[in-house]
Image (tube, rainbow, N blue to C red):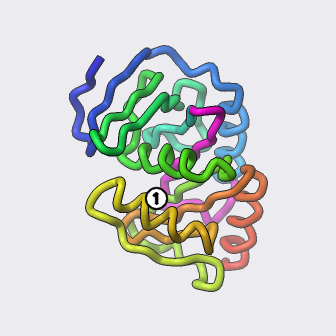
Amino acid sequence: MYNNMQLPFQLFTLSKEESNCPLIPQLIHFGKILNQSESMTGNIKVTMSSGFGKRVVINTTDVPINRLTRSDFIEIIDFDPIRNILLIIGSKPPHEITPLHWIIHHAKPEIISIVMLLDGTNSLRFPTTISQTIREGNTILETAKTILKTLQKKQIILVESKGVIITGNSFKQIKETIYQYLEKKK
């Protein structure tokens, strides 16, 4: 089934059922923890994903992170970066950066968890000693190539005009990274 939406990719929804991924409760809990940080206020939206097998589960961004439920997640079955086609399970539309998460998870299987702080105001600034700034590409694939190259050196990447990508082998590791910086910044 094709959903006709204003997304930078073609979307095919294989099922509108909720995902049964066992990682969703962990993602919901992590959203509540992130929301408790005083630094996570304002225009910042969060997209969290976790790889499991060949699939990726990711939240949609139309709900505050402290109120996420199972229905606020979609399961990415596959993404074809050449033809720009995304296959999902879930009833809500994905965010435009959803394919980027899929590409990172599949190109770097050691990355289990990804958190992207989407900041329209560019107020999130991690020091260059722990992050690297890159420019967004013209396509999802160009942006992904630059991010993957940068992930060889840094686990925190500032994407100009988008936000901050933080990767790790667990949400606990990402939480520690975020808190170490954002809580010191106060």
Q: Is residue 51 magenta?
A: yes
Q: Quadrant of the N terminus?
A: top left
85 relative to 71, above or below? below
Q: Position of residue 162 (x, y in %)?
A: 40, 63
Q: Quadrant of residue 137?
A: bottom left
Q: Is 80 on the left-hand or right-hand side of 123? A: left
Q: Nearer the viewer, residue 182 or 110?
A: 110
**Kind of element beneath mark 1:** strand
Count the labels in the image.
1
Q: Is residue 124 magenta?
A: no
Q: Nearer the viewer, residue 87 or 183?
A: 87
Q: Residue at x 63, y 67 (%)?
A: 155
What residue span does the magenta drawing correspond to?
Answer: 36-54
| Left or right of 39, for residue 101 | left
Q: Residue drawn at (40%, 28%), measured in percent from left and top?
A: 87
Q: Pointer 1: what residue?
A: 118
Q: Residue 11's x, y, as percent?
A: 31, 30
Image location (x, y in percent) of residue 143: 38, 61
What's the amino acid at mark 1? Leu
What residue is drawn where x is 43% and y is 27%?
88
- Residue at 59% across / 76% down in the picture? 131
Question: Dividing the image into 4 quarters, which one contains the C terminus?
Answer: bottom right
Question: Would you identify the image quadrant in which residue 43 lies?
Answer: bottom left
Q: Which is more toward the observer, 69 or 134?
A: 134
Q: Count neighbours of disc 1 (C-alpha within 10 A) and say few if under 14, some if 14 to 19, many if 20 or more.
A: many
User: Is 29 located above or below residue 111 in the figure?
Assistant: above
- On the image, the x and y values in percent for residue 154 come to 62, 72
